[in-house]
Image: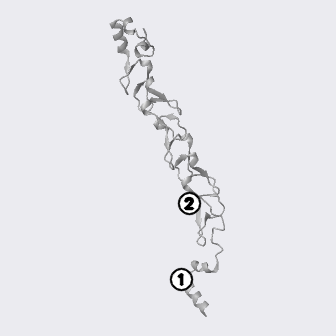
Amino acid sequence: MSRSDISGTTADTDLFTKCSVTEILALTAELEKSDFSDALAAPAEMRLSAVSGKRFNTREGFVSEASGETGHLSERAFCQVTGKQVLPNELVQCAVTGKSALPSECCVSGLSGRRAVKEECFRCDFTEITVLSDEIEVSDISGKRIRCDQVVVSRVSGRRGHSTESTVCDYSRSEEHTSELQSLADLVCRLLLEKK
């Protein structure tokens, strides 16, 4: 009689009638108990969890779809992007949405170094780096994507854009707005001269 007969992998209803008490005691003494339950199994059927290092019966486990490592069913987690069952330590959290995802399903921002799912990552049109959706704005002038730290707001029109878009920059100010750039003393002198 083999060890697997006792552990239940081979169905045999007359198992105890075929074995002597001595054989049953010898076989059960070799069985190991799962750290997660009271289930007994032959040593060949026991696995170690890649998460906790605890022993479990192969019928109580699963194999990670990401790494191929084994873990107990109570330790498994699911990738919220792909739906794969994985070990919890194989997941990262998206900085934008908070979803749990595999690192292969994410990108890293070149601006902040934060990680997010690929749907939340964009390439900037003016600087060729990847940024997250909460680090980007769209230019009012060209409709191009701009890093948040490179947005310029026009004092005249309030339009937002990249500093290289000349219509945003206030280089060509109208006469009524030039006074903003002058000192208070220059402004008083100018007003006095205009009254004459």
Circles 2, 1 touching at the beta carbon (< 8 Å):
no
Q: Which residue is mark 1?
A: 184
Q: Is residue 102 left or right of residue 40?
A: right
Quadrant of image for the N terminus:
top left
- Point out the tag, 2 or 1, that comes first from the N-terminus: 2
- Residue 149: mark in rendering: 2
Which residue appears farthest toward the front when viewing the image? 13
Looking at the image, residue 24 lies above or below residue 157 = above
Q: Quadrant of residue 161?
A: bottom right
Pinpoint residue 139: horizontal percent, then vertical percent: 62, 61
Looking at the image, residue 34 lies above or below residue 86 = above
Q: Quadrant of residue 142?
A: bottom right
Q: Nearer the viewer, residue 135 or 61?
A: 61
Q: Nearer the viewer, residue 147 or 185?
A: 147
At x 58% / y 49%, what residue is drawn?
121
Q: Nearer the viewer, residue 150 or 35?
A: 35
Q: Is residue 160 left or right of residue 13?
A: right
Pinpoint residue 113: horizontal percent, then vertical percent: 53, 50
Q: Amino acid at mark 1?
A: Leu
Q: Is residue 84 left or right of residue 164?
A: left
Q: CA distance from mark 2 to mark 1?
A: 31 Å
- Residue 168: mark in rendering: none
Mark 2 secondary-structure assignment: helix
Specify how the rendered protein is coloured: one colour
Pinpoint residue 165: horizontal percent, then vertical percent: 66, 65
